[in-house]
Image: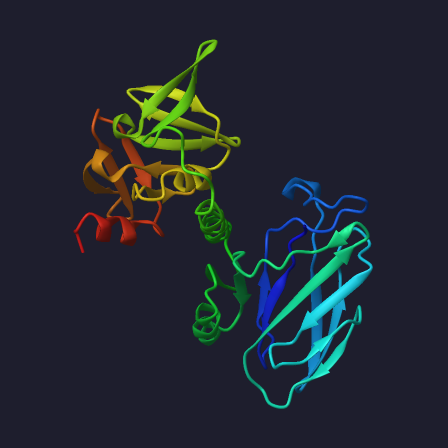
């Protein structure tokens, strides 16, 4: 079973992207995301006439298109004319040599556009996020974390709710989230700080959030995730251009400018 890519087509050609595995030749199971395989398509249009081009990896041998207006096609690279401009959800289910792709409309979509007015249409189709060009690294990281959070909602519940494994010497400990002040990611390794510093099994802060979806963890910087209950207060430095977060135990962490408004709102300071 292999996921498919989807976009939302608008008269102004609003683009979307997915972080998905795709067809892998000779394999009926999804390729891991790190394999580089993707099932996808691109499109161009003049007026309401749109040309779709399959760009799926792995050599699919069958295609099932739906164009969002009731029309379908089994061609690899169809051309479709819409009767009117509007918002249309277009899907492609590509069949690999070993079996058909799976339709997975619940998979998260992130839209990228230079036109802010298109955001309403994106969220009407339950997009995870909407990015305005040019996209900064910090903003992209936040969008990807939201994708991981959405994907993580369907994962099995943790065997020990409220606790998580950390490495300690040659063994493993189960640490309580309530004892944790914050998490920090360094070179794709997430460290938990709970009095001491412990290495976890996670590689991104998005994985931490997905493991504790109801904990309300706060992303105060691209590499820092804080437990709100551990925050004692905030102070401004640098002439008011920087905000430092003081935690129980005496640690102080700098919050990014982009994260500061949400941080203050969550703490009731706005």
Q: Position of residue 8 (x, y in %)?
A: 57, 71
Q: Position of residue 32 (x, y in %)?
A: 66, 41
How many tags in the picture? 0
Q: Nearer the viewer, residue 7 or 142?
A: 7
Q: Would residue 90 be found to the left or right of residue 184 on screen?
A: right
Q: Nearer the viewer, residue 70 or 219?
A: 70
Farthest residue, direction front: 99
Q: Nearer the viewer, residue 56 or 96?
A: 96
Residue at point 71% right, 75% down?
44
Q: Would residue 233 be found to the left or right of residue 222 on screen?
A: left
Q: Would residue 3 be found to the left or right of residue 51 on screen?
A: left
Q: Is residue 16 above or below residue 52?
A: above
Q: How is the image coloured?
A: rainbow
> Quarter of the image containing the C terminus?
bottom left
Farthest residue, direction top: 170
Q: Would residue 24 be found to the left or right of residue 256 on screen?
A: right
Q: Position of residue 189 (x, y in %)?
A: 49, 29
Q: Is residue 225 above or below residue 58?
A: above
Q: Quadrant of residue 162?
A: top left
Residue at point 23% right, 32% down?
247
Q: Is residue 124 above or below residue 110?
A: below
Q: Quadrant of residue 59?
A: bottom right
Q: Position of residue 216 (x, y in %)?
A: 29, 44
Residue at point 45% right, 42% down?
206
């Amino acid at each position: 079973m292999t996921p498919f890519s989807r976009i939302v087509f608008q008269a102004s050609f609003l683009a979307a992207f997915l972080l998905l595995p795709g067809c892998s030749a000779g394999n009926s199971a999804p390729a891991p995301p790190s394999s580089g395989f993707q099932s996808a398509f691109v499109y161009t249009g003049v007026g309401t006439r749109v040309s779709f081009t399959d760009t799926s990896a792995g050599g699919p041998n069958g295609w099932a298109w739906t164009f969002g207006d009731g029309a379908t096609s089994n061609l690899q690279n169809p051309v479709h004319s819409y009767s009117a401009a509007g918002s249309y959800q277009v899907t492609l289910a590509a069949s690999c040599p070993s079996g058909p792709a799976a339709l997975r409309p619940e998979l998260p979509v992130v839209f990228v556009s230079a036109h802010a007015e298109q955001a309403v249409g994106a969220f009407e189709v339950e997009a995870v996020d909407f990015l305005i060009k040019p996209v900064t690294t910090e903003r992209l990281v936040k969008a990807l974390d939201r994708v991981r959070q959405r994907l993580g909602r369907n994962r099995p519940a943790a065997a020990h709710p409220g606790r998580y494994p950390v490495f300690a010497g040659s063994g493993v400990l189960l640490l309580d989230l309530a004892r944790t002040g914050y998490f920090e990611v360094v070179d794709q390794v997430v460290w938990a700080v709970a009095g001491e510093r412990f290495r976890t099994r996670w590689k991104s802060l998005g994985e931490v959030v997905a493991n504790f979806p109801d904990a309300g963890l706060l992303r105060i910087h691209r590499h820092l995730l804080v437990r709100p209950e551990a925050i004692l207060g905030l102070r401004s430095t640098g002439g008011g251009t920087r905000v430092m977060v003081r935690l129980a135990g005496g640690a102080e962490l700098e919050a990014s400018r982009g994260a500061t408004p949400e941080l203050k709102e969550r703490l009731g300071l706005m």
